[in-house]
């Protein structure tokens, strides 16, 4: 069996500091924007978008020079947002091949994907490149893709490409001709090497590739031979793949401090769109979303929202986060925020043809969130019995669905029904020989025929709510012959008789 020919796809995004900031700021994409780097007053332009370049702005301009232009959006460079965007792009590239090498530069994103043998999954290289660019655009990044059988040829071609066309495929054996018109700037030249080639009049890769190899080595050493191989598309490469972890996280540093939740939710909506798109791309849903706010003064404010079922409904997540933040607002101005999501399996419910339509689970989550905002989180949930004999001893837990169905179904058994009285009803009772003899309940007089008990219980002496009581099961009959089966309880602390339940 012959080994398939190597094939590499290089994904290249120019002006990466600007693209990383504008990705989560769609309202600024149609405006001229520049990204400033450095400490005042020595700030300079390190990246800009196309509209700013059209107006005449260039790299290296100072803040004073930028101020001479009107209607320019100035953004400070954010290394954290660039790192988050880079992780997202590497994750996107990893969906096409497990072998991805990161070759990013200071102001540009560049990764190379080993797409050898992926034709049956994604089609020809041209089709794969179009699919890759489509996913990258969904993430808010503009890029180009170059495909070649030589690793370094694909990177050089991607650096020298313009955005139109955004895809270029080099056939095997045509690397030298395709690279010939590219400038030397696509290679990583030192200042000394760039000066030497400038003195020689060498400006393109084609001119460098035509230099005689022996004479070039004699003047520049093995570095000259390596540069000549790069220019001809013949340089071998040892692929060094990275293994990016799949983490649903988006981070954004706000341009100005935010106090109003409505302004914050606009930004949260854009970040949720990205998280939902990335989860949907892997046939997943968002099981929980955690929002971490960086506040003025360095404090952090974190909240986590977890509905009953995973969902990718953006409006539902915005509403749940809004209600949660209203109930637990931050105590200072917000400078930055981070959204982290936990992936979960998508939920599907198949109903029968004649089954009634069930309400959507997400509507119940929103309703419960509204109730929690009114009565408090500790007063909403499902009742769970406590490990105690105290009457009505229970606690509330958040609603949750079982992870799996029970292995066996226990058949139902007929049992006596007990109707609990809440609140318990006080009665007047006559005692004879320390046993109940007669009582009045709901304006009717009953004579006790059988009394079972007493069962005494008490406890929790360490709490203010110390309790102690004795319980009797009573069979009584009224004067008109009506029978009553009930549970009597005597509160030993207050010497009070009550009926707490009726037996049917």
Image: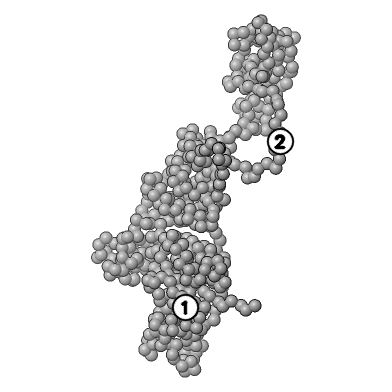
Query: Residue 482, located in which quarter of the rendered image?
Result: top right
In the rendered structure, the answer to whether residue 502 lies left or right of residue 325 reads right
- Tag 1's secondary structure? loop
Q: What residue sits right under mark 1 in the picture?
A: 170
- On the rendered structure, is 369 left or right of 181? right
Which quarter of the rendering shows the C terminus? top right
**Residue 235 visible in this rendered orientation of the protein:** yes
- Using a 10 Å C-alpha cutoff, classify the residue at mark 2 as few (fewer than 14 neighbours), some (14 to 19) or many (20 or more): few
In this picture, residue 183 sits left or right of residue 92: left
Q: Residue at x 46, y 44 (%)?
A: 316
Q: In the rendered image of this protein, does residue 22 appear above or below residue 206?
A: above
Of residues 496 and 166, the one drawn nearer to the viewer in this rendering = 166
Residue named by callout 2: 410
Q: Residue furthest front?
A: 353
Extreme residue toward the top, this view:
479
Q: Where residue 40 appears, x then y in whole percent?
A: 34, 64
Structural distance between the alpha carbons of marks 2 and 1 = 67 Å
Q: Secondary structure at mark 2?
A: loop
Measured along the vertical axis of the image, is residue 459 above or below residue 350? above
Q: How is the image coloured?
A: one colour
10 up-or-down from 475: above or below: below
Look at the image and tell me in which quarter the N terminus lies: bottom right
């Amino acid at each position: 069996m012959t080994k398939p020919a190597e094939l590499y796809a290089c994904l290249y995004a120019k002006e990466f500091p600007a693209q990383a900031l504008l990705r989560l700021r769609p309202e600024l994409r149609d405006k001229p924007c520049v990204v400033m780097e450095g400490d005042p007053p020595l700030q300079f332009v390190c990246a800009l978008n196309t509209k700013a370049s059209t107006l005449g702005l260039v790299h290296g301009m100072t803040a004073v020079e930028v101020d001479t232009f009107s209607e320019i959006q100035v953004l400070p460079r954010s290394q954290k947002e660039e790192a988050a965007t880079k992780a997202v792009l590497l994750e996107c590239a990893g969906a096409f091949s497990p072998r991805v090498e990161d070759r990013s530069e200071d102001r540009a994103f560049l990764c190379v994907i080993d797409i050898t043998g992926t034709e049956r999954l994604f089609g020809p290289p041209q089709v794969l490149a179009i699919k890759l660019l489509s996913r990258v655009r969904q993430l808010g990044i503009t890029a180009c893709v170059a495909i070649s059988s030589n690793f370094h040829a694909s990177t050089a071609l991607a650096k020298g490409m313009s955005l139109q066309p955004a895809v270029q495929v080099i056939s095997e054996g045509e690397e030298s001709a395709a690279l010939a018109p590219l400038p030397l700037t696509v290679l990583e030249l030192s200042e000394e090497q760039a000066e030497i080639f400038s003195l020689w009049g060498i400006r393109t890769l084609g001119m460098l590739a035509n230099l005689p190899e022996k004479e070039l080595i004699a003047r520049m050493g093995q570095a000259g031979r390596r540069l000549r191989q790069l220019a001809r598309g013949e340089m071998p490469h040892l692929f060094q793949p990275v293994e990016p972890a799949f983490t649903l996280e988006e981070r954004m540093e706000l341009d100005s401090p935010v106090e109003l939740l409505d302004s914050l939710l606009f930004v949260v909506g854009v970040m949720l769109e990205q998280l939902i798109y990335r989860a949907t791309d892997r046939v997943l849903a968002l099981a929980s979303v955690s929002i971490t706010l960086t506040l003025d003064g360095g404090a952090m404010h974190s909240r986590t929202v977890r509905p009953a079922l995973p969902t990718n409904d953006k409006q539902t997540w915005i509403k749940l986060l809004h209600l949660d933040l209203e109930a637990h607002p931050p105590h200072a101005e917000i400078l930055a925020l981070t959204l982290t999501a936990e992936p979960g399996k998508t939920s599907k419910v198949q109903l029968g043809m004649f089954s009634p339509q069930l309400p959507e689970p997400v509507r119940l989550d929103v309703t419960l969130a509204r109730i929690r905002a009114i009565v408090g989180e500790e007063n909403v949930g499902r009742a769970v019995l406590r490990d105690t004999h105290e009457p009505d001893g229970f606690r509330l837990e958040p609603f949750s669905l079982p992870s799996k169905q029970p292995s066996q179904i226990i058949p139902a058994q007929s049992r006596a029904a007990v109707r609990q009285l809440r609140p318990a009803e006080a009665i007047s009772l006559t005692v004879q020989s320390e046993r109940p003899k007669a009582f009045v309940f709901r304006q009717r007089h009953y004579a006790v025929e059988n009394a079972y008990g007493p069962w005494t219980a008490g406890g929790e002496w360490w709490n203010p709510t110390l309790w102690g009581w004795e319980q009797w099961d009573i069979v009584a009959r009224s004067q008109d012959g009506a029978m009553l089966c009930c549970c009597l309880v005597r509160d030993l602390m207050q010497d009070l008789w009550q009926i707490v339940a009726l037996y049917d």
